[in-house]
Image (cartoon, grey):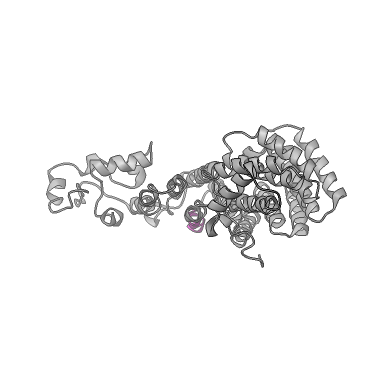
């Protein structure tokens, strides 16, 4: 593998090619930074290959046959070190790791100087990385994805540093890099790494201010408000949500304003301000009823009736109204699209906690068991923390039946990793 990464092997043999194509369906050898097979075949190529390792043959050392530019070297290394090698190393472990390793391969490093400055292809690669990582998060949660996702984020900002001549491309790269920073920040947030999340959100906000992107600024403030609420800083959550609404005023998206009103409501609930919370909730529902618009941001695909109900449940729970919260959480679980596996686990965990707090221990335990089953495919420190709270509440109830089943299964899966890192950085 080292000879491939270094460039000594310009084209892998058929066995290795099958592996790479299986891991990255739809991509050709040149897409992965290798030379086309037809460029390295022939008597000259075979002569140069004498003495090569039998498992990776057909190198091309003939400059007259083909000129391999530095861009291909960069692209190949990105796939070998960030994609195929990582995926090969994790394929035998949890499927989340194997899938997450592929995410790092979606943004190659910046173009080498010889090939010119970044263009539309690079901007598209950054945008695709955002979509791909969000898809993995929707299905599997953030843990196991976060660390690998920082690699394409670094590459995206390296592309910006390389300089862009066309304004349209520059705007796309800034927006893409900012959205990627928010996405990686969210992965850190959901993994309980609050300090890292705050840093990534600040990076996205700075990027938005540099390029004057109101949509990106609203998104960065939206996530900052969410993080502040979870980190126990409700007043900051209110201020950030209000700043997001100010930025979003120039965007034609009632649904975005609805979500931002919910972020504000969460802050008011954390401050135990029932009146402020109810006003924000009413505004969120009214704006949501306006329906989807063409101006809705792409990242808001998760925001539907289920998310609205789930976030309302969290507000009522924070206000101490567990019964009312349980009603909304039950609705959130019932309405959730099956694609959003992580959110099904999240709102089921919310339901379990609300039921436990409202004096329905058996139903709470049954919901908790469902969450534990979902956590076999989803990793989220935030969800695990919620489930830990439910377990503490249910330990006070008489054992037996589903309650005992839940507590035993919860204890069996608990550990340093499962417990998450919520609040690991109290100064963030």
Residue lying at the far bottom of the rendered structure: 427
**Residue in front for this viewpoint, 110 or 255:** 255
Give residue 283's position: percent from left, percent from top.
81, 41
**Relative side of 177 to 311, left or right:** left
Q: Nearer the viewer, residue 162 or 307?
A: 307
Q: Quadrant of the C terminus?
A: bottom right
Q: Would you say 264 lies left or right of 161 here?
A: right
Magenta span main SS? helix
Left or right for 376, reference 271: left
Residue 405 lies within the magenta run: no
Q: Residue at x 65, y 43 (%)?
A: 365
The magenta region covers 154-163
Residue 300 appears in the figure: no
- Quadrant (top left, top right, bottom left, bottom right) of the N terminus: bottom left
x then y, percent, for residue 369: 60, 42
With respect to residue 138, does 419 lie above or below?
A: below
Residue under the point 79% across and 41% down: 324
Q: Position of residue 48 (x, y in %)?
A: 14, 51
Q: Position of residue 318 (x, y in %)?
A: 77, 51
| Of residues 189 and 416, the one drawn nearer to the viewer in this rendering | 416
155 is within the stretch colored magenta: yes
């Amino acid at each position: 593998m080292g000879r491939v990464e270094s460039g000594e092997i310009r084209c892998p043999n058929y066995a290795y090619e099958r592996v790479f194509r299986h891991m990255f369906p739809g991509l050709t050898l040149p897409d992965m930074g290798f030379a086309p097979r037809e460029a390295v075949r022939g008597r000259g190529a075979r002569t140069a290959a004498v003495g090569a390792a039998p498992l990776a043959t057909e190198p091309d050392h003939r400059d007259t046959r083909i000129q391999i530019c530095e861009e291909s070297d960069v692209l190949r290394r990105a796939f070998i070190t960030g994609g195929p090698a990582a995926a090969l190393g994790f394929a035998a472990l949890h499927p989340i790791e194997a899938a997450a390793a592929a995410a790092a391969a979606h943004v190659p490093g910046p173009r080498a100087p010889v090939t010119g400055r970044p263009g539309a292809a690079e901007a598209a690669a950054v945008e695709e990385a955002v979509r791909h990582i969000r898809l993995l998060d929707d299905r599997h949660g953030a843990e196991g994805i976060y660390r690998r996702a920082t690699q394409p984020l670094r590459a995206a900002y390296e592309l910006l540093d390389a300089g862009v001549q066309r304004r349209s491309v520059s705007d796309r790269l800034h927006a893409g890099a900012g959205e990627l920073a928010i996405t990686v920040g969210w992965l850190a947030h959901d993994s309980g790494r609050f300090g890292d999340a705050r840093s990534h959100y600040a990076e996205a906000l700075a990027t938005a201010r540099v390029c004057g992107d109101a949509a990106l600024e609203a998104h960065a403030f939206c996530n900052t408000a969410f993080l502040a609420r979870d980190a126990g800083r409700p007043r900051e959550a209110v201020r950030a949500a209000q700043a997001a609404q100010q930025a979003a005023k120039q965007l034609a998206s009632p649904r975005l304003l609805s979500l931002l009103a919910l972020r504000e409501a969460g802050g008011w609930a954390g401050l135990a301000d029932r009146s402020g919370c109810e006003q924000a909730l009413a505004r969120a529902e009214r704006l949501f009823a306006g329906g989807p618009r063409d101006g809705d941001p792409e990242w808001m695909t998760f925001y539907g009736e289920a998310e609205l109900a789930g976030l309302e449940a969290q507000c009522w729970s924070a206000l101490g109204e567990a019964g009312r919260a349980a009603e909304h959480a039950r609705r959130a679980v019932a309405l959730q699209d099956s694609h959003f596996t992580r959110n099904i686990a999240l709102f089921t965990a919310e339901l379990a906690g609300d039921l436990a707090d409202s004096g329905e221990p058996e139903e709470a335990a049954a919901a908790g068991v469902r969450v534990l089953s979902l956590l076999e495919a989803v990793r989220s420190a935030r969800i695990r923390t919620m489930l830990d709270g439910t377990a503490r509440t249910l330990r006070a109830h008489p054992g037996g039946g589903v309650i005992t089943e839940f507590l035993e299964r919860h204890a069996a899966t608990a550990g340093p990793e499962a417990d998450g890192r919520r609040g690991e950085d109290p100064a963030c």
